[in-house]
């Protein structure tokens, strides 16, 4: 350190209503510390907040606001709660010490003061504070590093999902921006349902974020469907449609294998598996692959069912033009309680214009379509 730059001394705030005591303490400590003083509790609190001392030496018995009240006030404030408080007292009762430690005191020093003992006790508290400060700084660095690692993991997860979803687009590119649109539909619908009594304990912000992340994998199983079925330029036969329906279980199996390989809890993969397997189930039990009904269908899959069907209706296909938004709304409304969860249809109707806006924002206007066809339920 250059000789003309003096080290910064730790600061001690001395609080006592007796001037002689304040002077005595200041003289005893100023060789090693910067000493500031206050004559009453209110001034002490203000100085502690403005000067951020490293230690407070606090008289217990003062007129007006006593030391216990001052200590409690300091400990209740985020800006001063970590400042160690050492009480100065002429009392000898154990009860008084108990009150002090309950108020948050770090130590007691009794009057009449022994200056050598005072210096030793203050130095010990300063070492403890320095140690705590270093621990807090290290914890802060660790939290920042952890946050950065979590961001990296999140980015890797997103990249993995995009890569997997792109496999579907590469084989089934008639759907264009379908993956992106359904992702936004699901988040919009889930957010609309958050206050609903049936869903408010489940649809937390974290769950909705997971739904948004997982939704692009809902048709990942289509990579396992043969080209002559997936890309057929006409209506599927019953036998072909039976094969097409297996994309739900194929997709769930692919994601389940990924879960095993990850070897840890990956909530976005669990959610993606549910969506992939069950988003073609219907509220009345007439869907596939298991014929589940009502609440037996996972919440994530029920949300995707509306998102998937709406997008199929309003999107252009080789076998049909894009239906007008109003027609799609009528079709979904008519399926309330049959294909779709009734409460979800009600929520959809509250935000249907925003669905329309998402469809326009991520339209397929510039995408060339191959010759193939599916019904909207496939």
Image (cartoon, helix red, strand yellow):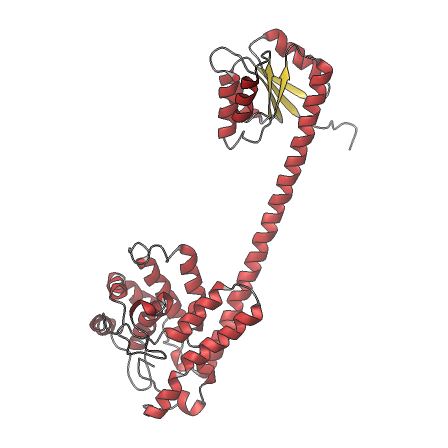
**Quarter location, residue 39:** top right
Residue pictured at 63% horizontal, 11% vertical: 111
Q: Position of residue 186 (x, y in %)?
A: 36, 65
Q: Is residue 75 left or right of residue 90?
A: left
Q: Position of residue 68 (x, y in %)?
A: 51, 20
Q: Nearer the viewer, residue 246 or 369?
A: 246
**From the viewer's perspective, is residue 257 above or below residue 28?**
below
Q: Nearer the viewer, residue 362 or 295?
A: 295
Residue 169 in view, yes or no: no
Q: Is residue 269 left or right of residue 187?
A: right
**From the viewer's perspective, is residue 367 above or below residue 150?**
below
Q: Is residue 332 left or right of residue 256?
A: left
Count the labels in the image.
0
Look at the image and tell me in which quarter the N terminus lies: top right
**From the viewer's perspective, is residue 338 above or below residue 11?**
below
Residue pictured at 53% horizontal, 68% vertical: 159
Query: Residue most toward the front?
Result: 94
Residue 129 in view, yes or no: yes
Look at the image and tell me in which quarter the C terminus lies: bottom left
Q: Position of residue 195 (x, y in %)?
A: 30, 54
Residue pictured at 41% horizontal, 75% vertical: 277
Q: Is residue 313 left or right of residue 3?
A: left
**Quarter location, residue 54:** top right
Query: Residue most toward the right?
Result: 3
Q: Position of residue 284 (x, y in %)?
A: 26, 74
């Amino acid at each position: 350190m250059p000789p003309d730059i003096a080290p910064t001394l730790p600061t001690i705030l001395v609080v006592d209503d007796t001037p002689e005591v304040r002077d005595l303490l200041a003289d005893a400590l100023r060789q090693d510390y910067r000493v500031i003083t206050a004559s009453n509790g209110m001034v002490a609190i203000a100085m502690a907040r403005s000067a951020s001392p490293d230690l407070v030496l606090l008289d217990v018995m003062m007129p007006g606001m006593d030391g216990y009240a001052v200590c409690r006030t300091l400990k209740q404030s985020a800006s001063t709660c970590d400042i160690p408080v050492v009480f100065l007292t002429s009392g000898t009762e154990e009860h008084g010490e108990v009150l002090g430690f309950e108020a948050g005191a770090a130590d007691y020093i009794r009057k009449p003061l022994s200056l050598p003992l005072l210096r030793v006790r203050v130095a010990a508290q300063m070492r403890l504070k320095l140690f705590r400060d270093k621990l807090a700084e290290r914890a802060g660095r660790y939290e920042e590093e952890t946050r950065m690692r979590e961001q990296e993991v999140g980015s890797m997860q997103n990249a993995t999902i995009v890569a997997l979803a792109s496999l579907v687009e590469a084989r089934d590119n008639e759907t264009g921006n379908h993956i992106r649109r359904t992702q936004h539909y699901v988040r919009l619908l889930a957010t609309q349902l958050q206050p609903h009594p049936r869903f408010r304990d489940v649809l937390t912000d974290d769950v909705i974020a997971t739904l948004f992340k997982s939704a692009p994998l809902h048709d990942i199983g289509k990579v396992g469907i043969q080209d002559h079925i997936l890309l057929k330029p006409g209506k599927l036969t019953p036998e072909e449609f039976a094969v097409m329906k297996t994309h739900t279980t194929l997709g769930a199996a692919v994601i389940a294998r990924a879960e095993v390989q990850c070897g840890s809890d990956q909530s976005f993969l669990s959610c993606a598996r549910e969506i992939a397997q069950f988003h073609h189930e219907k509220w009345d039990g007439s869907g596939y692959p298991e014929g589940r009904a009502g609440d037996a269908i996972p919440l994530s899959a029920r949300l995707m069912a509306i998102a998937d069907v709406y997008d199929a209706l309003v999107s252009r296909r080789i076998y049909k033009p894009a239906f007008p938004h109003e027609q799609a709304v009528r079709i979904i409304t008519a399926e309330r309680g049959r294909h779709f969860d009734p409460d979800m249809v009600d929520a959809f109707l509250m935000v249907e214009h925003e669905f329309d806006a998402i469809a326009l924002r991520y339209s397929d206007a510039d995408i060339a379509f191959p010759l193939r066809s599916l019904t909207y339920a496939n």
